[in-house]
Image: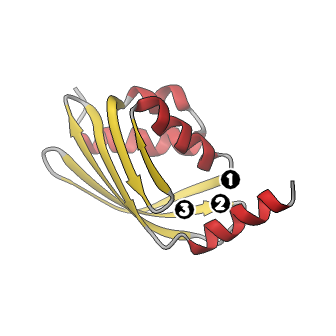
Amino acid sequence: MSTPRQISETYFTAWEAGDYDTLGSVLAEDVDFVGALGQTSGVEETLAGLKGLGQVLTRIDVRARVADNSDVITWFDLHTSIAGPAAVANWAHVEDGKIKRIRVTFDPRQLIAGLNQGQQAR
């Protein structure tokens, strides 16, 4: 059985690589996500949100990861094709070997501006 730290590492590696099968495999069916760009409930909705941001994701630079028995906090720089890097804090709660809750905080203003410019260009 993987540790919460290993599960978090798999989550970020899979997301950065666009490997949504592996990413989905570490999420609980009833995972819930709350972040600066919205919230989701359930694995399908959460994957859809991650895939959406994945369309502009270019790189994730993990700066620090702290884990205990069931919780992992990952501090990382989110690089996208539409905005400068954003410093992000991600808290994941793991139960029964799956990520059950995700909370993300960062300043989304540059990313939102980039997303809005992309929509206007269409």
Residue most extreme to the right: 122
| Label 1 CA crowd tier, 10 Å (few <14, some 14–19, many 20+) | some
Task: Say whether residue 95 is left or right of residue 26.
Answer: left
Q: Which mark is residue 56?
A: 1
- Report the residue at 38% width, 53% height from top: 34
Query: Observer-nearest residue: 47 or 87?
Result: 47
Question: Helix, strand, or loop for circle 3?
Answer: strand
Query: Where 50 sits versus 121, above or below?
Result: above
Query: Observer-nearest residue: 100 or 87?
Result: 100
Q: Which mark is residue 78?
A: 3
| Three-letter code for the amino acid on which mark 1 is drawn | Val
Question: Helix, strand, or loop for circle 2?
Answer: strand
Mark 2 to mark 1: distance in Å? 5 Å
| Three-letter code for the amino acid on which mark 3 is drawn | Leu
| Three-letter code for the amino acid on which mark 2 is drawn | Thr
Query: Observer-nearest residue: 8 or 95?
Result: 95
- Report the residue at 43% width, 43% height from top: 40
Report if the CB atoms under discs 2 and 1 are less than 8 Å apart. yes
Report if the CB atoms under discs 3 and 2 are less than 8 Å apart. yes
Mark 3 to mark 1: distance in Å? 10 Å
- Report the residue at 48% width, 35% height from top: 45
Give how far across and how far down residue 12 sits, in percent. 45, 46
| Label 3 CA crowd tier, 10 Å (few <14, some 14–19, many 20+) | many
Mark 3 to mark 2: distance in Å? 7 Å
Give how far across and how far down residue 60 sits, in percent. 53, 56
| N-terminal-most mark, 2 or 1 | 1
| N-terminal-most mark, 3 or 1 | 1
Q: Name which quarter of the figure residue 6 lies in.
A: top left
* Residue under pointer 2: 80
- Report the residue at 53% width, 43% height from top: 50
Question: Helix, strand, or loop for circle 1?
Answer: loop
